[in-house]
Image: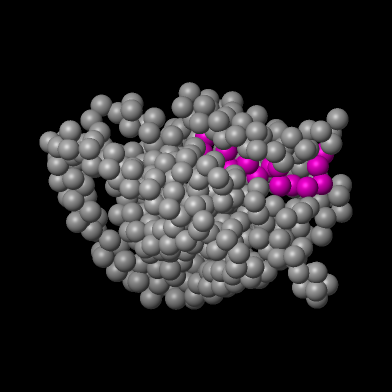
Amino acid sequence: MLKKIERFTLSTPYLILASALAVVVWAMDWGDVGIPVILALMFLQFVLFQDAMPSVPLLMSALFMVSQTIEDFNGIPFYLYMVPFAILLGMIVHVIRFKTPFWKGKMTIGILIMFAGMILSSFNAEEVTIYYLFYALIGLLYAGLYLFYRNSLDGDHVQYLMKTMMLMGLVVAFEVLIWFLRVEDVLYAIENKTIKLGWGISNYIATYLVMFIPTTIYFAKKLKVGFLFVILAIFQVAMLLLTASRGGILAFAVISLPLLIYLIASKNGLQSLLSLLAAGLAIFILGWINREWFLSLWSRFQTVMLDDSGRWVIYREAIAVFLDHPLFGGGLFARIDGNAVYHMYHNTFLHTLATLGLVGFVGLAWQLWVQFSVLWRQRNAATVILLISLAGAHLHGMLDNIYYMPQFMVLMLIVVSVVEKSNLILEPGLARSR
């Protein structure tokens, strides 16, 4: 019976079910029930199955189920505090039961350096509270997730991961669509970037679309019905534009060229090109019919794109904090206002330097090197697409540092874990040397 269940959890219908569940729970605002249920299912999978990969779709689905925006620390619901404890407990039981080795992995050193920077930064922090400790625990959870999945995967799961990411891209896109269908004034929402899905605002929503859209392009080239995935990719790009996230849109503009070359340079390239042209014609006709609405939308969109939102002031603040505390930084909450609302410095590198100092920056640099070197090892279609996905996210991180956001950290660490495991399976000599 368990074998049948495990086979089902490695199937495409299971992935579709997990993705659909994420949209339903989010749309109905059932997170206080849906997330605990997902955690319970994940715990059972950790306990029952030696291969941890089937828990990945559940974990990713849970990340996009939170529909209520948390404005400050006091607004964090109790079940979210239980997430790291439930996951850690399940991983501990799994490691003990299946005697899983735990410390192997190329990211380990970089993670430990950054965690050390996080602890040392507390000496410079203005105030160390329970929230500081909670965020430090989240950092420890990231390390545990990487080490757990890196050593608990049984087999080459790159294709499984690609399917999961493609479906998660549809989850995010449909949540954006549902949000805009519910809003009264779409133009006002775009101009003022008021979109809030609960688990993230416009900039973070854009990041995940930038990461997921390339996997849709991958299947557009891989499958015979690729033209359907071209349409899905165009739908996702449209939802990305609706976020009005400048960083996300610019990052996707950069990676769109290699994605377009990849899509057209295949035996189904002509079909894909015709699909793109047909979609472009449909958009043109729609725009012509609704000229006034689209001109108004474009005007408001230009207003958003040309506003720097005080980025340069924030960057100077980050540099000032770093110069005051160059070694360990000013602490996790170096940029926080009087209402206990946590803010970032809108640049991955500057944020790391300001909050964690040079120690944290060394850990970040190590992690970035490992990410791209691991993905570059095979250089096949899937790993190159994953490399483009991460590159797009990191480009966005130059304007909206997304590196420490839960969804990104979990996704990035799982991507590295899956590909690193695949590298070892495909290169037995490398596996023996480690």
Judge by depth and name the residue closer to the eye, 106 or 134. Answer: 106
Image: 4 above or below 146: above
The percent position of residue 117, horizontal first and vertical second, equals 56, 68
Image: 237 above or below 32: below
**Residue 9 picture quarter:** top right
Q: Quadrant of the N terminus?
A: top right
Q: How many numbered discs?
A: 0
Judge by depth and name the residue closer to the eye, 423 or 400. Answer: 423
Residue shown at 51%/56% (left/top)?
A: 267
The percent position of residue 110, horizontal first and vertical second, equals 61, 69
Q: Is residue 54 left or right of residue 257?
A: right
The percent position of residue 324, horizontal first and vertical second, equals 39, 74
* Residue 55 counted in the magenta span: yes
**Residue 414 picture quarter:** bottom right
Residue shown at 49%/75% (left/top)?
A: 358
* Residue 302 counted in the magenta span: no
Part of the protein shown in magenta = 48-65
